[in-house]
Amino acid sequence: MGCASEDAKIVKSIVHAGTKVLPFRDGTKVKFHYQTRKCDESQTLIDDSRVQRKPMELVLGKKFKLDVWETIVQQMALHEVAKFRCDKSLVVQYPFVAKTIRDAQKPREERKHCCGMTVQNEGIGYKDLDELFSNPQDLEFIIEILSIESPDEYEKESWQLSDDEKLQLVKKLRVQGNEAYKEKNLTSALEAYSYAIGIIEQLMLKEKPGEPEWIELSQIKVPLLLNYSQCKLLEEDYYIAIEHCTEVLKYDKECVKALFRRGKAHMGAWNFAQAREDFERCAELDTSLKPVIDKELAKLQEQLRQRDVEDKLKYQKLF
């Protein structure tokens, strides 16, 4: 059974009928396996998602680089298998889409950015895709629809969310991180805080530093950075803790929590002068912390004494 679109640039042939017709709208997620073949005498295979062991996921309405895939999947039912012969004018971007998909299977360090100049001088990086790019031709896609999910049936990834939805997700992640921290699950807590920090950083990039919107976002970011640094302190990953506390102090120079935690991290890293400076600054900003700070300074003095003893022993062995 076959049919053609009005302009005859897409010709569909059903291989296996689907089980259910579902509605499509912006935000619908379609998961499918695909084969890509040249429309030559030998039906040369270019790509097969089953070989790559990863089906394609497409979210409709998100301006995917290959418009024709959005068009053809919306002509299909759940679990349907169909062939689509597509005119070469509709698949000009396929070599670049295929490169992106193939590269995603590789370790990050082996991936190579592909700009217009690189293509002109070095090619796309795959012989068959270079040939297809140089000699465009009609392609046949064999598509099997695995699942069709409406926007309210799945948890969206952050790039699919609106700015308001991203802020709501940040709140949710902070709560998740706090709960994991209480349960002493530092790995899960760090994952939640890190994900939330990344989302806030994306939103801050849209705003001009110093403007009210940017300041508001930075205030949301500060407690996440502090929580992250506390987890790193407990893991004794001192330099990462120092880095995150220092970032907090860029937003709030008088943040006592950041100074105290950075002081603790400097102690752990044996940066004694910096630790003393942070602790003394804490005591200046919050006099009620003086007893706590005095204890930390006493620990610091003891660490200095121990290091002096160790240094003397090393020198004795040398001579």
Image (cartoon, grey):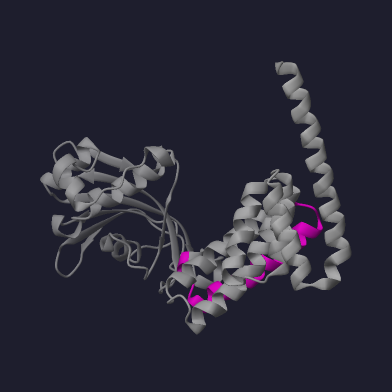
Q: For the view shown, which residue lies furthest in the left direction?
A: 135
The residue lying toward the viewer, choosing from 172 and 257, is: 257
* Quarter-of-image position of residue 254: bottom right
**Horizontal side of residue 41 vs 303, given as left or right:** left
Depicted 281 relative to depicted 220: above or below: above
- Residue 234 in view, yes or no: yes
Residue that appears at 87% across and 56% down: 295
Question: Can residue 161 be found in the magenta stretch?
Answer: yes
Depicted 80 relative to depicted 251: above or below: above
Residue that appears at 18% across and 55% down: 92
Question: Residue 59 at what x, y percent from top left?
Answer: 41, 64
Q: Give the quadrant of the C terminus.
A: top right
Q: How many marks?
A: 0
Residue that appears at 33% across and 63% down: 64
Question: Residue 132 at what x, y percent from top left?
Answer: 16, 44
Dominant secondary structure, magenta: helix
Residues in magenta?
Answer: 159-185
Q: Give the quadrant of the N terminus.
A: bottom left
**Horizontal side of residue 32 vs 185, given as left or right:** left
* Quarter-of-image position of residue 24: bottom left
Question: Can residue 64 be found in the magenta stretch?
Answer: no
Q: For the view shown, which residue lies furthest in the front direction?
A: 319
- Residue 188 in view, yes or no: no
Question: Residue 121 at what x, y percent from top left?
Answer: 15, 42
Residue that appears at 44% across and 70% down: 205
Depicted 57 relative to depicted 267: above or below: below
Question: Residue 296 at what x, y percent from top left?
Answer: 83, 54
